[in-house]
Amino acid sequence: MRRRIILALPLQALLALAAAPARAAAPPLLRGEEAEPRMRALQRGGFTLLLRHGDTRGMGCDRTTDWRDEAGQRHLSPAGEAQARAIGEVLRAWRIPIAAPVLASPVPRVRDTAVAAFGAGAVVLDQRLLSDEFTADVAATAAAQRALLAEDPPPGLNRMLVGHIASALQVGGRRITQAEFPEGAILVLRGGAMQAVLDLAPLPGGGAHGCGWNGPPGTEPPSPR
C-alpha cells in the first residue's frame, strides 16, 4: 500500500504542472532609440498602457495598507514628479492618442504621477487599480484588473492606466521584477498580452525604490508595489 502511494505522488505532480497556465516571458525593456518603433506603433492606437508610478527613492516607506492615510504612504520623490511630467511631454511630443479619461489608482504616489503627466482634469481615480495590499478583496481586484488590462481601447486610441507593478502579475502569470518594470515605465499590452516595457524618462540609478515594509509584524505585503 505504501509503495503505491509513493509511486502516485510524482504522477499527481506532473498532472498539476501540465494543468498550470504557462507563465509569460518578461517583455523587452526599451529605452531611447530602441523604443521608437514601438512609439510609432502607439501612434496608430489599439494598445492598453499601464504606467507605473514614478520614482519614490528616498521617500518614507509605506506604514499602512490604508491608501486614504497619506501620511502613512510612500510618495513620489522630487525626481519622480519631474519624471512624471517628462513622460507626459514625451507622449504628447510623439502625438500618442490616449482615450479619455486616464484611470489611476487612488494611492497618492500613483495619483500624483497621473496628475503630473496628464493634468488633473484628465484623470479619474479608480479603485480597481489598487495594489493587492490596499484592498480587502484581493481576488475581486485581481479579476477587475485583468478585465481592464484586456479591454480593447476605442478605435484609433490607446487606453492609459496608471497604477502599480502588482497589476502586471494579472497578465504575466508571475511576479514581474522591478528591473523588468521600473518605476516610471509603461507596460504596453494588446489583447491582454504584454508586448513591451517603455522607459521613456529613465533616471540614473532609478527604477527600484528599495523599500521594505514598515507596517506591523506579520503584515508583509505580497508585492513590491
Image (cartoon, rainbow, N blue to C red):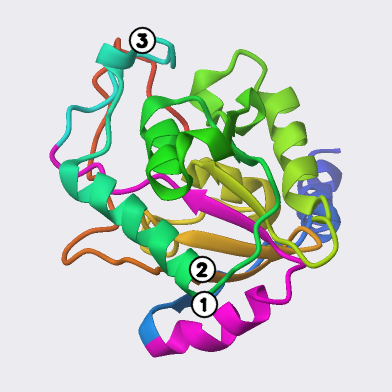
Kind of element beneath mark 2:
strand
Mark sitting on residue 28: 1
133 lies above or below 15: above
Q: Identity of the amino acid at label 1?
A: Pro
Tell me if residue 225 can be seen. Answer: no
Q: Mark 3 vs mark 1: give the one in front.
A: 3
Position of 181 with respect to 143 (left or right) is left
N-term mark: 3 or 1: 1
Mark sitting on residue 69: 3
N-term mark: 2 or 1: 1
Residue holding disc 2: 197
Extreme residue toward the left, this view: 58
Q: Identity of the amino acid at label 2?
A: Val
Asked if the residues shown at circle 2 and circle 3 are in contact, with their CB atoms under 8 angstroms apart, the answer is no
Image quadrant holding the N terminus, namely top right
Q: Quadrant of residue 110?
A: top left
Q: Residues within 10 Å of mark 1 (few under 14, many from 20)?
A: some
Range drawn in magenta: 33-58
State how far apart marks 2 and 1 are (Cα). 6 Å
Q: Residues within 10 Å of mark 2 (few under 14, many from 20)?
A: many
Residue 12 lies within the magenta run: no
Q: Quadrant of residue 221?
A: top left
**Residue 54 locus on image (x, y percent):** 34, 48
118 lies above or below 60: below
Kind of element beneath mark 1:
loop
- Front one among 184 and 93: 93
**Residue 112 locus on image (x, y percent):** 38, 34
Q: Residue at x 59, y 68 (%)?
A: 96
**Residue 28 locus on image (x, y percent):** 52, 77
- Front one among 220 and 51: 51
Asked if the residues shown at circle 2 and circle 1 are in contact, with their CB atoms under 8 angstroms apart, the answer is yes
